[in-house]
Image (tube, helix red, strand yellow):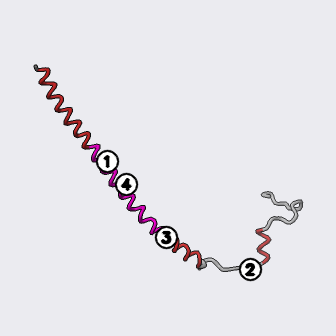
Amino acid sequence: MQVGGAGAGGGDAADIRGRHRIQAELKKLEQEARFLEEELEELEKTDKVSSALQEFLTAMESKADPLLPVTTGPVNQSWDRWFEGPQDLRRCKCWFL
């Protein structure tokens, strides 16, 4: 009879541990559900942000950069020779070409 009594007491302890394990899993699932709901709310807001961002980019691209000079071509034609390749490769004495 002692074995049955000890087994019944041990079963109660196992039930308590099982209940705590289930409660911990339930809390974890509830936290994950809350996290996913928050993510969904943020995603719903991103559509508004992306449309506002698109408007901002369009406005910024339409304006010229105040720090860059506005030129349609080279101001000094002699500067072009520094950025062009050599006209005659056989006469070129450049080591890097």
Question: Which residue lies under the disc numbered 4?
Answer: 36
- Few, some or many C-alpha atoms within 10 Å of disc 4 (few <14, some 14-19, many ≥20)? few
Judge left or right: residue 69 versus residue 58. Answer: right
Residue 83 belongs to magenta span: no
For image coordinates 74% across by 78% down, the residue present is: 73
- What residue is shown at x 89% (from left), y 59% (from top)? 90
The amino acid type, in three-letter code, at marker 3 is: Ser
In magenta, the rendered stretch is: 24-50
Q: Quadrant of residue 12?
A: top left
Q: Are marks 3 and 4 in contact (CB under 8 Å)?
A: no
Observer-nearest of 43 and 59: 43
- Please tell me whether mark 2 sits on a helix, a strand or a loop: loop
Mark earlier in primary sequence (3, 4) = 4
Which three-letter amino acid code belongs to the residue tagged 1? Answer: Leu
Alpha carbon distance from label 3 to label 4: 24 Å
Separation of marks 3 and 2 at Cα, in angstroms: 39 Å
Q: Are marks 3 and 2 in contact (CB under 8 Å)?
A: no
Residue 26 percent coordinates (x, y): 28, 45
